[in-house]
Image: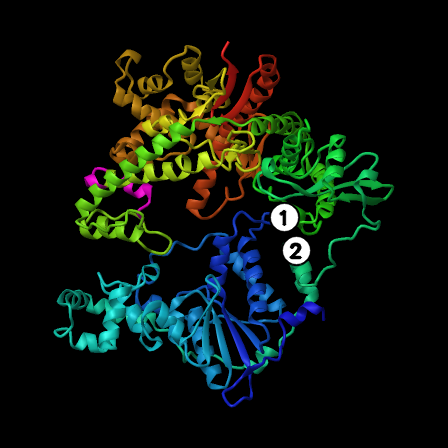
Amino acid sequence: MSQQSSLFNEKKSKNLSPDGSQKPKLVIIDGHNLAFRSYHAVKRLSSSQGQATNAIYGFLRSLIAILKAEGEHDATVITFDAPAKTFRHEQYSDYKAQRSPMPEDLPKQIEIIKELVNLMGLYQIEVAGLEADDLFGTMAKKCAALGYQVEVITSDRDAFQLIDEAILIHNPIKGVHYDEAKVFAEHGVKVSQWIDYRALTGDTSDNIPGAKGIGPVTAARLLKTYSTLDYILEHLDEIQPKKEAQKIAASKEDVLFSRELSKILTDADIAIEPQLWAKRQADDEKLSQKLKELEFHSLLRELNLAPASTPLKQETLPLSQAKGEILALGYLLSHTDPLQAELLSLSAYHEAETEGRLFSSKEAQEQLDFLKQANLSACDAKALALYAQSKGLELLPEDDPLLLAYVIDPDVTDISTLVARHGLGEWTTDSGQRARLSAQLWQKLSAECDEAQHKLYQEIEKPLAKVLCEMEFYGVVLDGAVFESLSAEMSQKLSDLEYQVREIADNPLLNLNSRDQLATLLFDTLKLRAGKRTSTGKQSTAVAVLEQLRDAHPVVNLILDYRELAKLRSTYLEPLPKMVNSKTGRLHTTFSQTTAVTGRLSSLNPNLQNIPIRSDIGRQIRKGFIAAEGYKLLVADYSQIELRVLAHIADEPALIAAFQKGADIHASTAASIYGVPLNEVQSGMRRIAKTINFGVLYGMGAHRLSRELSIDYAEAELFIKSYFANYPNIQNYIDRTLSQAREYGYVESLLGRRRKIPDILSSNRNVREYAERTAYNMPIQGSAADIMKLAMLALHPQLKEHGAKMLLQVHDELIFEVPED
């Protein structure tokens, strides 16, 4: 047995019973709840074989943390829902109907989680017809009766009904342990009233109706006054205020049924054998093998199932002694912004004969002296180069494993995931280890890289990093007076909008930032048609939902305007002036080459790519970006670049001809769709054609087109059919791209930039259709992104001759600071 096994196997607890004798402790984990939370908490994680692992990894991380936090205990049990309908579904056909369907890649992960739980030596249970909470409810109550102290780990609040002196509930999300006092302090009801409380309030996520119009505060007050739901229902004529009694009376059947659905079983017919659960043992060998298959190398070491990272055989030498070719640098900065950071430590790694040699220093002067003659090859080499430039060293980034990884697979560029996937260890804050791992990762990735990917890296991504480094270092000037004036103006407009909405709502305290209060106003008070629900089952008030209700009531436009202005103020007007570098007097963004899977650049900290251009306020904000004295800002953009790329890739003669003639492309499309001469195209016809032109790029179907244009579905379908009839080669392009994606599992841009499409053969229609849209959009977006990058590379050396600077890249445009002459 490894040292790790003691984490999962039998432990002697120190929980004492009231008479002072030792009381055994049982920990019960709501496994299904934990798996679902882990799935949504960890994004975009899969093995090199394509197996989704986000839920598995998140589950194991949480499980280990929970067991460590629980300390010494005698046994652990993990409960799961069985993959079948429960008795509640049979009682109530709409039970949990509002919940989103289980993601297609989650069931397989749950099966692997169960396998791992078994290998860890933990007892797990699932019973057809019962939910996980019925299992932990029964186990908790029966084991408590046997003299155990029980702790149930779940974020399901229905579990509060189980609490007593021997049973506590631990919510791992909040990190809170609930006993009777804690429940009362937080919700205002006793544990004995919890089921009645839930019957009144309902639960939209489980589609449990409750009493319409009775919220948590009202329910708690009623139960405080009248003690039980039975009393309330039997004495409705006495309940005050009358309007609340009337609401409950109108929902009486729903309330009674909600109470039944909210009850957790505590007497299910299952075996209760805590002493046997405690005797289970971990199978370290098989557990280790499974974790290696999943490429969870960091977990192997955390569980003491694998040796720590391979130590260097030679001692670390002073940085000043480093001679010869450096394979990679490792570094640690004190701040996420390299221009404001200090270099906490710097290490250099190169191979000496057959063994690695590492040189390190924390001395600032020695670091700078070394950097002057170093080749800046490192993970995120651009950030190290920016730090060097902030110290007066004219250095630029060289090779970067993260850029090479991005070219190979843009979905996996996180450094911790990469080193773990390649079995290299764990990325830590040790600069020496970072240097070694960077060199080893570079070697691994270079071996994976094919000729086309290597060319893309060498001819675009690597040289572009140098251009971006100079752009980031130079920054852009803000006009503080413009931002201050706009912020004050915006505040006044927001106050006016808030007043108008409150007048309509007849509620002077209405909070426009409260989703619940807005939902009540729109869907209960004004009776507007409800849109989709959130993941928790509540009525959504998202922008996409409200956009569809614009014509339903004037208040909708007011709310949308309020949201747009509030977002612009909080995203740009208030924070940007505060982010100006005190040393340079300019604002510096970071351009990430590895964030967008399409190949586009992303602007981060702050994001300067999302300032709206079509709205008046967006244009005013842009005026706050100015040139230095003696210079002008020059903006150049590509016209309809994605549509041009589409015309080229699809080899569509009619579309190519329209571009070659310099025609209005949307008017040309309208003329084709409607079958009229170009000079007879009206503005409404052009608007429809424009929507279709861009919609085709992103796989817009007739349903969405009908919503976008507020037209009938049949009419939208006719427009799309007419479009493809006039541009048949576009349909041919889509068909052959999907065929390639199905055959090879990926698509690529004109220059060979690839993106994997793992869901292209999914049996889930929604998942498959999304993958298909991604597949034929990527070559267009990816090619457009490559063209922009080539333009930046071509322009950069020519700008220097004229004393001009490239400042920003925003979608299809470049912004320069050029001398006035």
Residue 554 among magenta residues: yes
User: Pointer 2: what residue?
Assistant: 298
Q: Residue at x 50, y 55 (%)?
A: 39
- Residue 407, image x, y percentages: 62, 34
- Amino acid at dot 1: Ser
CA distance for labels 1 and 2:
9 Å
* Callout 1 secondary element: helix
- Amino acid at dot 2: Ser
The image quarter containing residue 805 is top right
Q: Residue at x 30, y 26 (%)?
A: 688
Say if residue 492 shows up in the picture.
Answer: yes
Q: Are marks 1 and 2 in contact (CB under 8 Å)?
A: yes
Neighbour tally class for label 1: few under 14, some 14-19, many 20 plus, Cα within 10 Å = some
- Magenta part of the protein: which range? 540-555
User: Pointer 1: what residue?
Assistant: 416
Say if residue 612 shows up in the picture.
Answer: no
Q: Earlier in the sequence, mark 1 or mark 2?
A: 2
* Callout 2 secondary element: helix
Q: Residue at x 31, y 13 (%)?
A: 678
Neighbour tally class for label 2: few under 14, some 14-19, many 20 plus, Cα within 10 Å = many
- In this rendering, the count of numbered labels is 2
Scheme of colours in the image = rainbow
- Residue 392, image x, y percentages: 66, 29
Judge by depth and name the residue closer to the eye, 364 or 396.
Answer: 364
Q: Which mark is residue 663?
A: none
